[in-house]
Amino acid sequence: MTMAIPENDSYQLAGKSYHSRLIVGTGKYADFEQTKEAIALTGAEIVTVAVRRVNITDPTQPNLLDYITPDKYTILPNTAGCYTAEDAVRTCRLAREAGVGKLVKLEVIGDERNLYPDVTATIEAAAELVKDGFDVLPYITDDPVACKKLEDVGCAAVMPLAAPIGSGLGIRNPYSIKIILEQSSVPVIVDAGVGTASDAAFAMELGCTAVLMNTAIAGADDPLAMARAMNLAVDAGRTAFLAGRIGKKLYASASSPITDLIG
């Protein structure tokens, strides 16, 4: 089935055009083969890789990039597991030295239990990385002020969380996301907390540029089926956004005309 999304419905990220609005991670799968198959089913063009957790640098060990190849996907290294700005900056530089480019997903975690970002350290690291020539996509709270500060220091996008990483709770505060969308001149990508297809569709219906997820697919009972579901959900949500939903009303409104009734 072909969705009614125009062929030219793309978005720009760090000077490159993308059509898929689903960005996916590579963690928690059974093996690299399942990772490869699931990601293919999502239709994603951008794949994020945890530099500190998945091998992309040691040629003597199984390498994820032998399965998720840079000639087919944009590889987005991320700084998962970093708790200071210094560690995050160092990890991004390591990824660049490994040859995966200058587009990076910045994570600076502030709390080990809830995995919320350290906002101050994230802004500090983002500013340094931008000055160093990186195109930075920062994982951040759904705080319009923090998102605006990250845009002002030169980030290529902002990535407010939907809910805590891996929680599956879906978008907890759509009104904050809407404010972020209204004020932003860079792509807004919902990151973290998606649990199922309806969550992904909702993010797109709000008008978000894209949605990023990992656990929702890799942690499903059937990751391959969920990968396909997320692909369809993102397309459906984007199509609904472009179509323009009806307004919400307190009272009923007849779906059929009430004039010129047959007597």
Image (cartoon, helix red, strand yellow):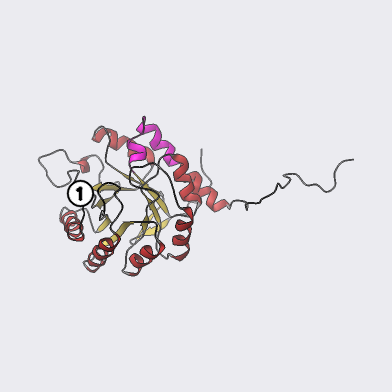
Residue 160 lies, in percent from the top left, at 38, 55
Q: Residue at x 43, y 39 (%)?
A: 196
Residue 247 lies, in percent from the top left, at 63, 53
Residue 244 among magenta residues: no
Residue 215 among magenta residues: yes
Relative vertical location of residue 175 with respect to residue 113 in this rendering, above or below: below
Q: Secondary structure at mark 1?
A: loop
Nearest to the observer: residue 131 or residue 216: 216
Q: Viewed as shown, does residue 67 lie left or right of 197?
A: left
Quadrant of res 195: top left
Magenta residue span: 214-232
The residue labelled by disc 1 is 51
Residue 4 lies, in percent from the top left, at 54, 46
Amino acid on which the number 1 mark rests in the picture = Val
Near mark 1 (Cα within 10 A), the count class, few <14, some 14-19 or many ≥20, is many
> Is the magenta region chiefly helix, strand or loop?
helix
